[in-house]
Amino acid sequence: MHFAIIAPPVPTQKWKENFERIAPHIHLVIGSETEHPEKVVCAMVWNQQKGALSIFKNLKLIFAMGAGVDHVLSDNTIPEHIPICRVVDQQMAFSMSNYILMAILNYHRSWYEFQDAQSRKHWAQFEFIERPLKIGVLGIGHLGMDAANKIHNIGFPVIGYSNSPKKTIFPSYSGDQFDKFIEQINVLVCTVPYTPKTHGLLNYSLFEKLKEPTYLINVSRGSVQVEKDIIKALNMGLISGAFLDVFEEEPLPKASPLWSHPKVKITPHIASLTYPKESTRQVLNCFDRIEKGLDIPQQVSREKMY
């Protein structure tokens, strides 16, 4: 019984170390090249090339090494009978929520203005107020719900939006109530999964619906945003600033105007990273349940794409 890891070098090494520690009885294949592809029954993948799994004819499980699965589902060479699972980890939610709170609080307390004042050796006492915020979380799934709950618990007004109704401790909207959601906010936190429905969702048409200048925080996927529209909305005053962790092309090209825009903050897709120890445990649990013919708690719906 062999498991394969197909991912960039750094996460591959971390997952390999944890597997060798937790499940030394499982033979690991690194990459898709092996003399015995017929022995590979589970593939753990992140941004694999299209067709990379075709060599494995006896796959029983594909495990996405993260919360998103668009990189797996975009590969139409994968047979539909093979279950796909993803990481669902409270530690990932902890990291994601901390990142979102950091972005919100820096904006709320005018941190960047104080940094500028420090660079000029200027004592800016009483020059900047605590910005009054009305925060909307677009996408209240596992990660978005955790963030929205924490935003609510520290005292900020927060509302949520999702495709289907959710039971929340804060006001939330769903379905055709999107306009009601978007017109109430001045901070927009995007945590939606990438699907055909969310492709290019953060575009100029959406920004025109905002009732007041709004701060944008995107931690979902780069394909959810239209970067030229973000820049246009910033320059038109529809968006007051943007804190972006994901981009249409990654790494973000050096020629991108986002790098030097004065109202844009950039991080390199690090808002929430996978924790190999817990993820290894989840892979083993999912595979064990498949072997026993049991339901898989983290199985992805190909229709919903999450």
Image (cartoon, rainbow, N blue to C red):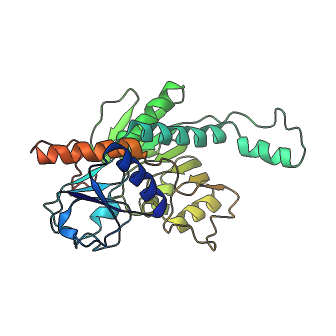
Using the image as rendered, state which of residue 37 and residue 183 is in the foreground: 37
Q: Residue 133 appears in which quarter of the rendering?
A: top right
Q: Position of residue 257 (x, y in %)?
A: 64, 69
* Left or right of 237, for residue 57: left
Residue 58 to residue 19: above or below? below
Q: Residue 40 appears in which quarter of the rendering?
A: bottom left
**Residue furthest out toward the left:** 293
Q: Report the residue at 27% width, 69% height from top.
A: 75
Using the image as rendered, state which of residue 211 and residue 55 is in the foreground: 55
Q: Residue 282 appears in which quarter of the rendering?
A: top left
Residue 87 to residue 204: above or below? above
Using the image as rendered, state which of residue 67 and residue 143 is in the foreground: 67
Q: Position of residue 30 (x, y in %)?
A: 36, 64
Q: Report the residue at 43% width, 48% height from top.
A: 274
Q: Report the residue at 49% width, 45% height from top.
A: 189
Quadrant of the snapshot with the N terminus:
bottom left
